Image (spheres, grey):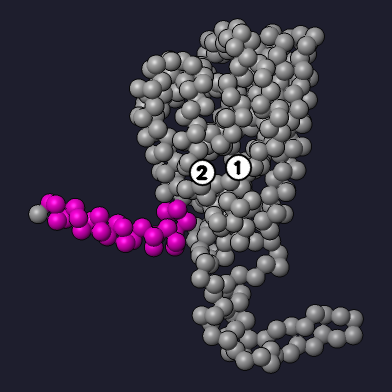
């Protein structure tokens, strides 16, 4: 009896899942997050026995990233990397990046092979999120206790010798906490202390804004395109501890400028406006085309200095069904609640088109 109920539940789930996915932005959000975490967790289980053969080796991350990056096309994410030559330099450096979401790590999986030997500063709590935490530790991640600044600084300083000897890059999110607020927040000093004391260059890495596809408050996650830019390294040779505030300001200002430029480029390229997930002005939607086709619908001629005539469309009214493209579907809007605004997904954001970019 129980097996029959289980089979019935499974059949219903398989039938209803595509319907929920196409009609509910909230369902799509949780489904994509589930897929992302599931891929990472499954890979952690699979790689832990392999990592035991070379524990705490940062090269394990390069191996894991080849499989974890498979989550990106599944959830319709595209990462466009610029400045790959800076990431691939065979030298120790401190890489600082803006932090918006856990999706930042998914982006790193996509270009980890470029960085080759790279480790990450992560909060200590992640170590206890097994199996991911154990796999991360076996991959050479450096866990710090952010509640104790002195301990965190000591852990980062102890990693310096390894960075220099093995030509390893150290990835840090200097903002500390991830926040999707469409801006780059003030930086903490830890990463810059490490760079100055070891005389290692700072390599700024900038993710364009996730506002173009992600709204965690309203649980909306549309197909996304993110530009990841590695800026030229900022040398620290000759600098002292007293120069750190100016170094932080110079680095952050360069990152803010790139952040604004690349975000604007994504908005313009995919015809997005303002907050990101609503079409730009002048873009027709399914609703507007249906309204124009209904009996009694009128269209206005362009207004000029000599004429403001309003005329009825003389063409025969086409069936409403012909106006709705088979690929159109409902996506959420940041300006409305949930699925309040049924708008057609921008063509360039459909998975098949994104993969051709």
Q: Is residue 242 shown above or below 255?
A: above
Residue 123 colored in magenta in the image: no
Residue in view at x 48 percent, y 41 percent: 70
Q: Which SS class for mark 2?
A: helix
Q: Which residue is situated farthest in the left direction here?
A: 1
Q: CA distance from mark 1 to mark 2?
A: 8 Å
The residue under label 1 is: 79
Left or right: residue 329 compared with residue 230: left
**Could you classify mark 1 by the number of other residues whose Cα lies within 10 Å: few (under 14), some (14-19), or many (20 or more)?**
some
The residue under label 2 is: 72
Q: Which SS class for mark 1?
A: strand
Give the total of numbered labels: 2
Residue in view at x 61 percent, y 70 percent: 285
Q: Which residues are magenta?
A: 2-28
Magenta stretch: dominant SS? helix
Q: Quadrant of residue 13?
A: bottom left
Q: Which residue is situated farthest in the right direction here?
A: 305
Camera-nearest residue between 80 and 97: 80
Residue 249 rendering spot, x and y as whole percentages: 76, 24
Residue 273 rendering spot, x and y as whole percentages: 68, 56
Residue in view at x 49 percent, y 61 percent: 339
Q: Is residue 311 shown above or below 184?
A: below
Tag 1–tag 2 contact (CB < 8 Å): yes
Left or right: residue 55 compared with residue 217: left
Camera-nearest residue between 85 and 210: 85
Q: Is residue 161 shown above or below 113?
A: above
Q: Is residue 179 visible?
A: no
Q: Is residue 307 shown above or below 167?
A: below
Left or right: residue 55 compared with residue 236: left
Residue 7 rendering spot, x and y as whole percentages: 19, 55
Residue 237 rendering spot, x and y as whole percentages: 78, 11
Q: Quadrant of the N terminus?
A: bottom left
């Amino acid at each position: 009896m129980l097996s029959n109920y289980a089979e019935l539940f499974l059949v219903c789930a398989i039938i209803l899942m595509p319907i929920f996915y196409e009609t509910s932005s909230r369902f799509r959000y949780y489904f994509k997050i589930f897929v992302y975490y599931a891929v990472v967790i499954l890979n952690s289980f699979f790689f832990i026995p392999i990592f035991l053969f070379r524990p705490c080796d940062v090269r394990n991350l390069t191996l894991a990233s080849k499989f974890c990056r498979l989550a990106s096309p599944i959830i319709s994410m595209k990462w466009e990397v610029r400045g790959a030559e800076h990431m691939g330099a065979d030298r120790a450096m401190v890489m600082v990046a803006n932090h918006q979401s856990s999706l930042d790590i998914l982006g790193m999986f996509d270009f980890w092979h470029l960085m080759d030997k790279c480790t990450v500063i992560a909060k200590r709590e992640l170590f206890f999120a097994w199996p991911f935490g154990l796999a991360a530790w076996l991959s050479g991640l450096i866990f710090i206790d952010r509640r104790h600044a002195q301990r965190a600084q000591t852990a980062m300083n102890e990693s310096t010798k390894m960075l220099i000897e093995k030509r390893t890059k150290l990835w840090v999110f200097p903002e500390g906490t991830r926040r999707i607020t469409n801006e780059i927040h003030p930086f903490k000093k830890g990463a810059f202390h490490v760079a100055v004391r070891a005389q290692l260059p700072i390599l700024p890495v900038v993710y364009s804004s996730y506002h173009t596809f992600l709204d965690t408050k309203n649980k909306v996650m549309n197909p996304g395109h993110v530009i990841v830019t590695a800026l030229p390294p900022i040398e620290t040779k000759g600098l002292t501890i007293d120069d750190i505030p100016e170094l932080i300001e110079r680095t952050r200002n360069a990152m803010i400028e790139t952040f604004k430029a690349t975000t604007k480029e994504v908005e313009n390229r995919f015809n997005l406006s303002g907050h990101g997930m609503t079409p730009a002005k002048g873009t027709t939607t399914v609703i507007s085309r249906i309204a124009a086709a209904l009996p009694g619908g009128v269209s206005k001629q362009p207004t000029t200095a000599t004429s403001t005539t309003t005329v009825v469309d003389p063409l025969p009214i086409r069936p409403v069904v012909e106006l709705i493209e088979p690929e159109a579907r409902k996506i959420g809007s940041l300006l409305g609640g949930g699925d309040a605004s049924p708008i057609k997904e921008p063509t360039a954001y459909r998975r098949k088109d994104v993969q051709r970019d």
